[in-house]
Image (cartoon, helix red, strand yellow):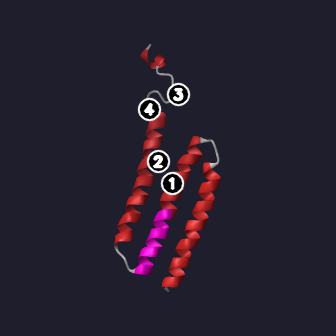
Amino acid sequence: MADFLTGAALFILAVTAIALFRVLRSGIVPERMMAVQLLGTGGAAALLLLGTASGSAATSDVALLLALFAAFSCVAFVLGADGPGADGDSSKERQ
């Protein structure tokens, strides 16, 4: 069973790497933010599978942190895009 879980984790990592390559080639900023989300979810899934295969409990903590960092970065991106100076011209708001 451990071989199957390790193979599934490697498959998820390979698919995530291919998708990241495709998304990061884009010049659109929201698509790059989706790459961060993809890395967080794909990495967390692979870590959880590898942790289950090896019987290690520490990988689940790392997977949780990776998923949380990806979610927090998306929240920061959205709040930063709607905040003051999002259009790059802060002189309009001062007048």
Q: Earlier in the sequence, mark 3 or mark 2?
A: 2
- Magenta part of the chain: 43-54
* SS for dot 2: helix
Residue 79 located within the stretch drawn in magenta = no
* SS for dot 1: helix
Residue placed under numbered mark 2 in the picture: 74
Kind of residue indicated by mark 1: Gln
As measured in the structure, the alpha-carbon distance from the residue carrying label 4 to the one carrying label 2 is 14 Å
* SS for dot 3: loop
Residue 45, horizontal then vertical, whole percent: 48, 68
Question: Any mark on residue 37, and which?
Answer: 1
Q: Earlier in the sequence, mark 4 or mark 2?
A: 2
Question: Any mark on residue 87, and which?
Answer: 3
As measured in the structure, the alpha-carbon distance from the residue carrying label 3 to the one carrying label 4 is 9 Å
Mark 1: give few (<14), some (14-19) or many (20+) Cα within 10 Å: many
Mark 3: give few (<14), some (14-19) or many (20+) Cα within 10 Å: few
Residue 34, horizontal then vertical, whole percent: 55, 51
As measured in the structure, the alpha-carbon distance from the residue carrying label 3 to the one carrying label 2 is 18 Å
Q: Earlier in the sequence, mark 1 or mark 2?
A: 1
Q: Are marks 1 and 2 in contact (CB under 8 Å)?
A: yes
The part of the image, by quadrant, that contains residue 84 is top left
The part of the image, by quadrant, that contains residue 16 is bottom right
Q: Are marks 3 and 1 in contact (CB under 8 Å)?
A: no
| Principal secondary structure, stretch drawn in magenta | helix
